[in-house]
Image (cartoon, rainbow, N blue to C red):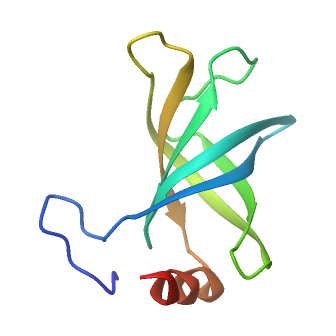
Amino acid sequence: MCYNTCMDARRCKRLIVNIQAELLSVDKRLSVFIENLSEEGLYVTAPVKSTFSFVTDMPVEIRFELPAGEKLNLHCLVKWAYSTPPHGLTNSVGMTIIDPPLTYIETLKALQ
């Protein structure tokens, strides 16, 4: 359950960030940027020129470092993805976090 409510259709408040992360799926790794995050989801951008294909409901793991220096792994499902206009140089990807760890939730509360 979210600790914040949103004014729009989203259930959880989004925190705007710019965090470099690593996305893993089966045997592939890809460097991405987390653009915003919430208790239940992430929005990341990834280069289009990669061998990585994003498919709805595909399980992925995202690894990154919290502002306090703690490393975190989140298990997620891809909910949507598309090439970002106007030049299509990056993919925009929305993900749902599966069972976010307490450390992650507490960090979000502290950053609000």
Q: Who's the residue at 21% across and 78% down the image? A: 5
Q: Return the x and y of residue 74 as percentages of the image width and height.
A: 66, 64
Dividing the picture into quarters, in which one does residue 1 lie?
Answer: bottom left
Numbered circles on residues, count: 0
The C terminus, quarter of image: bottom left
Q: Quadrant of residue 41?
A: bottom left
Residue 38, position as x, y percentages in the image: 43, 68
Which residue is painted at 79% across and 79% down in the image? 70
Q: Residue at x 71, y 24 (%)?
A: 52
Specify whether 39 is left or right of 24.
Answer: left
**Residue 77 higher or lower than 12, as above or below:** above
Residue found at the far top of this picture: 87
Reply above or below: 4 against 53.
Answer: below
Which residue is pictured at 55% across the width and 74% down the height? 99
- Horizontal and vertical percent position of residue 16: 44, 60
Residue 61 position, x and y percent, is 71, 53
Comparing 63 with 86, the one in front is 86
Outermost residue, right side: 27
